[in-house]
Amino acid sequence: MNGKPDEGKVLIRVRRQDAPGAPRRWEYFAVPLRRGMNVITALQDICENPVTADGAPTTPVAWDCNCLEEVCGACTMIINGKARQACSTLVDTIRHPIVLEPMSRFPVVRDLVVDRSAMFEALKRVRAWIPFDGTHDQGAAPRMSHRDQQTAYPLSRCMTCGCCIEACPQCNPRSQFIGPAAINQVRLFNMHPTGRFNAHERLEAVMGPGGVTDCGNAQNCEDACPKNIPLISSIAEVNRATTLLALSKLLGRK
């Protein structure tokens, strides 16, 4: 595709892939430019009229989305070279032509859709939940101090979008690194008054291969996080806690 789109239109360059392992290709689309439109709107326009900018019929572009308000993380993709959410990225605030690609740290399902199941498996590995017995009334739960609430709330904003994974050089096919998001959840649930009872299980889950010590300290994750989660602090806190647990085991105190 050469030249510029017609007046009142924006050019979208999309990296296409029909199936896992299928060849990749680039396609250009010219969509109507409307004030305040986001990237999802542009993709919907392409879906309604799947014709390239050169006039050739093609298949609709596949992508993920759900909440459309930067809460679910489903629409995360590479937009102009940066991992971000398509729902909150406004077309008139980024450079044109707009280049859309799937995230590179996850297997491609089709076009802009990737399989982020590795992140959810990591949450299972670190037991990112508060266990409780719901068969009987256990009474009031322990209180959480206001200071802990203030610290924990930013940690809870994670939407498992994958931006931190995409930005981390340690998250690659040659590494088992679990990633910043799961480590942050270890810190969050270990701060909870009830979650502390299982803190050692979460810490042990990130003490082996692929655990917190595999972090290369690049510190790209925090800059990439759309929710401004203090991931560097979380990694440092969990690293400290795992060290103390290892020492206590060595000294026979646990």
Image (cartoon, rainbow, N blue to C red):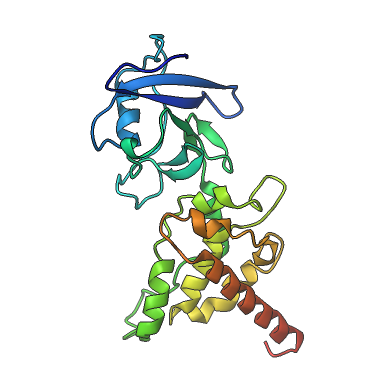
Residue drawn at 35 percent across, 20 percent down: 30
- Horizontally, residue 189 falls left or right of residue 35, namely right
Q: Nearer the viewer, residue 207 or 76?
A: 76
Give residue 96's quadrant in the image. Answer: top left
Q: Position of residue 124 (x, y in %)?
A: 53, 60
Q: Position of residue 251 (x, y in %)?
A: 75, 89
Residue drawn at 64 percent across, 51 percent down: 169
Q: Is residue 124 above or below residue 112?
A: below
Q: Is residue 243 above or below residue 170?
A: below
- Horizontally, residue 245 falls left or right of residue 185, namely right
Quarter of the image with the C terminus in it: bottom right
Q: Position of residue 126 (x, y in %)?
A: 56, 65
Q: How many marks?
A: 0
**Can residue 123 be spotted in the picture?**
no
Q: Nearer the viewer, residue 115 or 82?
A: 82
Give residue 66's quadrant in the image. Answer: top left
Q: Is residue 116 above or below residue 47?
A: below
**Can residue 248 be spotted in the picture?**
yes
In this view, which residue lies farthest toward the left?
35
Q: Position of residue 54 (x, y in %)?
A: 41, 10
Residue drawn at 51 percent across, 23 percent down: 18
Residue drawn at 50 percent across, 24 percent down: 16
Give residue 140's quadrant in the image. Answer: bottom left
Q: Is residue 135 above or below residue 160?
A: below
